[in-house]
Amino acid sequence: MNQTNVAHASATVTSIGATATTAATAADAATTTITFDRNRLRIEDITAIAAGGCTISLSDDPQFRAAITRGADFLDKLLREDGTIYGVTTGYGDSCTVTVPPELIAELPHHLYTYHGCGLGEYFDAPQVRAILATRLTSLCKGYSGVSVGLLEQIAQLLQHDLLPLMPSEGSVGASGDLTPLSYLAAVLCGEREVWRAQQRVPAALALADAGMQALRLRPKEGLAIMNGTAVMTALACLAYERAHYLMQLATRITAMASFALDGNAHHFDETLFSVKPHAGQQQIAAWLRLDLDCEQPHRNEKRLQDRYSIRCAPHVIGVLADALPWMRSSIENELNSANDNPIIDADNERVLHGGHFYGGHIAFAMDSMKNTVANIADLLDRQMALLVDTRYNNGLPSNLSAASGPRAAINHGLKALQISASAWTAEALKLTMPASVFSRSTECHNQDKVSMGTIAARDCLRVLTLTEQVLAAMLITVRQGVALRAGMQPTPALEALPGARLAHMQQMLATDITLIEEDRMLEPDLRRLLEHIRNRKWRLYGE
């Protein structure tokens, strides 16, 4: 296939959208088919597969299968001609100078995944493993890895039967790719180690047999092709991107509610004001805030002339993520759709090209950047919360937003502890913003002497997203309380007092999950319920 066509072909996907993993689209996702071939896939394809609600298939197109077969046949030809191929007729890494005797070549791929079986830490969860398998399959389907169609079919069947390798999350330096975690995929394909099946740990050999699958005997280079790539970090980046995109929108809606609760100045988001600083993402955040707030309101003399930065500069903070997401998508999707193992097998021109495409620098940079921008949003909302609970700054709302009245107000403390917890989550998120990519370590006898740390960056980013989502959950409780209290202070103490229908609707939805806090109560159940809603994208926000 022509290289240009490979790079620019559209994905073979049916009816898949940007929110394919949401609860609202679960029924549609169940009828979605994602076909793996040499065409491009998008982040949303990987996240849909991760959610487990769509059908996947390996293309049966004869041209696609012939292109894959040419790579494997070319390697066989080289072996018959006594060619020297890294990782096929030589040892791995620094051992590339070691020649493997012909009679032992068939054993080499199995040694590779065996000695890399040294991962530790938490196991990747089921959606993460599905994303990893789909990402690795996408790369191998490009046709430059020298693998057989049978190997691709075996990975596709793992996804189809939801047999998910038990894969430790720690042990990758992000070049030569995600060797250690991906060794668990290679081993499972060969009937070794364990899988998750219906939320149970099952020996891989048993799971394959029950599914009517046969354990593979890897062909030359197939072990290296499976493991020597960026599938883990890229899969995690796909999942992180989707969460960050929703978080950006929800943080904007929360800011609008916080502004109303604080009796803030909506004219801070004026269109002309933002036209003179033309960052498109920042302008979009301001435009969304204008949709939620009455920005044409006249300035009242009793109002503070300028709101504090956490309200006034919210578009400037959230907008950094909004402006960064497009280039993050580009980096992630280019990595997703790349052949990123070594060596690259150019069967059409009968060449073996030795390089370093396993290096995960682009993903590392995207994830280090994302965790920085996301943690800054946690910090923004934490500062908004601090204003809302403090009678010195909240423009007449009760202390800690307690709705208790009369003598009982003396023993009720409202959101005092919630603000402490939100501050703790924010601090932890900010602590994790140190870029992982600057901690390259020389490894493997100084062969891997400059590495990306992309997988660590991606894992850190997911943790920062989790912590920030916890801050969002705390702020949803806070703004629901603050808006209700502020509306009660208006001449018309009802939802009609809110400046826009969007905020009224959001307040109504939050009220179904969060009872007004008049008497102190344990808030953990509310927080966990809200976190589930955030992760399921319960609330339709802007442009949806």
Image: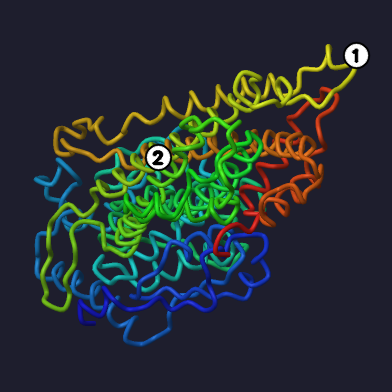
Is residue 327 or residue 268 the one in the foreground? Answer: 268
Q: Position of residue 476 (x, y in %)?
A: 66, 39
Compared with 97, 67 (above or below) is below
Quick check: 396 left or right of 230? Answer: right
Amino acid type at mark 2? Thr
Q: Position of residue 186 (x, y in %)?
A: 40, 53
Compared with 291, 366 (above or below) is above
Q: Please, which residue is most extreme toward the right here?
A: 407
Residue 407: image tag: 1
Question: Which picture quadrant has residue 81?
Answer: bottom left
Question: Which picture quadrant has residue 1?
Answer: bottom left
Q: Where is residue 378 in the image (x, y as percent from the top left)?
A: 50, 34
Amino acid type at mark 1? Pro
Figure coloring: rainbow
Residue 186 seen from this side: no
Residue 345: image tag: none
Disc 2 marks which residue? 373
Precedes in sequence: disc 2 or disc 1: 2
Compared with 431, 491 (above or below) is below
Q: Are marks 2 and 1 in contact (CB under 8 Å)?
A: no
Residue 68 seen from this side: yes
Q: Where is residue 61 in the image (x, y as percent from the top left)?
A: 39, 86
Residues at marks 2 and 1, CA–CA distance in whole angstroms: 44 Å
* Mark 2 secondary-structure assignment: helix
* Mark 1 secondary-structure assignment: helix
The local crowd at label 1, few if under 14, some if 14 to 19, many if 20 or more residues have their Cα within 10 Å, is few
